[in-house]
Image (tube, grey):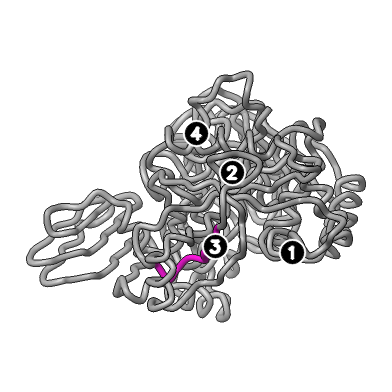
Amino acid sequence: MIIPVILCGGSGTRLWPLSRTHMPKQLQAMHGDTTMLQATALRLAGFAEESVGAPVVVCNDAHRFMTRRQLQEIGLQQSTLIAEPVGRNTAPALTLAALSIADPEAVMLVMPADHVMADAEAFRAATEIAAVTAHAQGSGFASIVTFGIVPTEPATGYGYLQVGGTSNFHPAAFNLLRFVEKPTIEVAKEYVDSGQYLWNSGLFVVRVSVWLQAMSVLAPDMLAACKASLAQGKRVGDDLLPDREIFESCPADSIDYAVMEKLGSDAALKIMGAVVPLNAGWSDVGAWDSAWAIAVKDAHGNASIGEAMFENSHNTYVRSSGPNAPVIACVGIDNAVIVHTPDAILVASKDSAQDVKRIAARLGERKDSRAELHRKVYRPWGWYDSLGSGPDGAGFQVKHISVYPGQSLSLQLHHQRAEHWVVVKGVATITVGESVRDYQPNEHVFIPLGEVHRLENKTDAAVEIVEVQLGAYLGEDDIVRLQDKYSRA
């Protein structure tokens, strides 16, 4: 049985302004109509149902509800979701997933949620080889399998795997000799010309028991912290919530550093590394130049998502998103990236795409919310779009709010603002003080300062309102939650 394990962490700061802390790239539709998380979960759709189990998804606790909703949108009702209270890199994330799987001999297919795979059939074929390899025993040894991407160029943005002879575990797999960090262009050319090196994909296939055995020898403190955090954590439906205090004490490390690069360092640990070559149109979409590389282009190498016009321009990537997105006209522009969101515009040379993360970092240092939030912010109950505000955010603020069917905001009050609500779509159940009643489109509600109130959607269609906030302070922290179905009170 193959259990997909989807690692849905990371912030994707090199893809700012589309990717932000509270809505990172794996939850965005970077390539195609589905989000990267959804595309990853759908990647095994061609396997026989009896050979693939329900996925385990490990994400940040702040993304828990959005992650669950995106899985439900593609019909994945049965999945285990592990919400990390803090990020601790990929080795603890995989360990949490392994501990949550009942069958110790199940094979985990470990997939980061931010990869693109153009050829799903080739990926499935390589996965079948890797699964057989991971199940095999050779002279008392077991294996942890990684996919090595067949290089298409001497790239300097990826780590490399040096492969040896044919593996004893499978004739289509190779022995893993060593990991190599991102090389210079000269060294990368030597690697590709030698035929002995593949790109390091970050994809793994390993039996649950083998991974836990490796952790017990190579990272016992990490394994102990993961076990304790799950034992002291909570289960809410199919969601596992590890204990925050214990998980914060867990060492942070990647799968490569914690385990893979140490295989062979302990003679008692009879686990070897194996590599299955993969040629499936893989990309990790790590920066905007990667997004351009996988996009559909015109005869001059230009690619666009949203409305764009190109005149005497070449090898340029344009992306425009949001309501009433403008047309972006490029005249005499070469080798550039232009990304528009409702509250930010990025203009960069493709050659400097890796440096975009520095802009996100500088915004974070000055406490600018645009490092973390989009103008449209998703919440467990739905979303709100900040349409406008007074000078410096003071005096008034206007929001467009949408509530999913069957969901509700918390029962709350504000100390520093009053609010006016106008229902524009659906039937809204609104509490104001002791009054609870349904409101139709074009009806208005006034929420006095300090009054207890709540917005609910008891129907099977979306409810939308326009909210006008009035007050000297309009920050999101002026919310006193009295009751909340999402445990935020």
Residue type for callout 3: Gln
The N terminus lies in quadrant:
top right
From the viewer's perspective, is the residue at label 3 or at label 1 nearer?
Answer: 3
Magenta stretch: give its range. Answer: 155-163
Looking at the image, is 101 positioned above or below residue 364?
A: above
| Amino acid residing under circle 4 | Arg
Give how far apart the Cα atoms at labels 1 and 4 are.
Answer: 28 Å
Q: Earlier in the sequence, mark 4 or mark 2?
A: 2
Report the residue at 65% width, 56% height from top. 449
Query: How many angstroms separate mark 3 from mark 1 (CA)?
Result: 15 Å
Q: Amino acid at mark 2?
A: Met
Disc nearest the viewer among 4 and 2 = 4
Q: List x then y, in percent, for residue 14.
A: 46, 67
Gap between marks 2 and 3 measured at Cα: 38 Å
Residue 153 in the image: state x and y as whole percent.
34, 63
Q: Which residue is mark 2?
A: 66
Q: Is residue 367 left or right of residue 89?
A: left
Q: Which residue is mark 4?
A: 124
Q: Locate residue 161, reporting x and y percent.
A: 54, 61
Residue denoted by label 1: 262
Residue 246 picture quarter: bottom right
Secondary structure beneath label 3: strand
Where residue 415 sits: x, y (%)? 70, 61
Residue 160 within the magenta-colored segment of the rendering: yes
Tell me the element at label 1. Answer: helix
Label 3 belongs to which residue?
A: 162
The answer to whether residue 72 is left or right of residue 282 is right
Q: What label does residue 58 carry, if any? A: none
Earlier-in-chain disc, 1 versus 2: 2
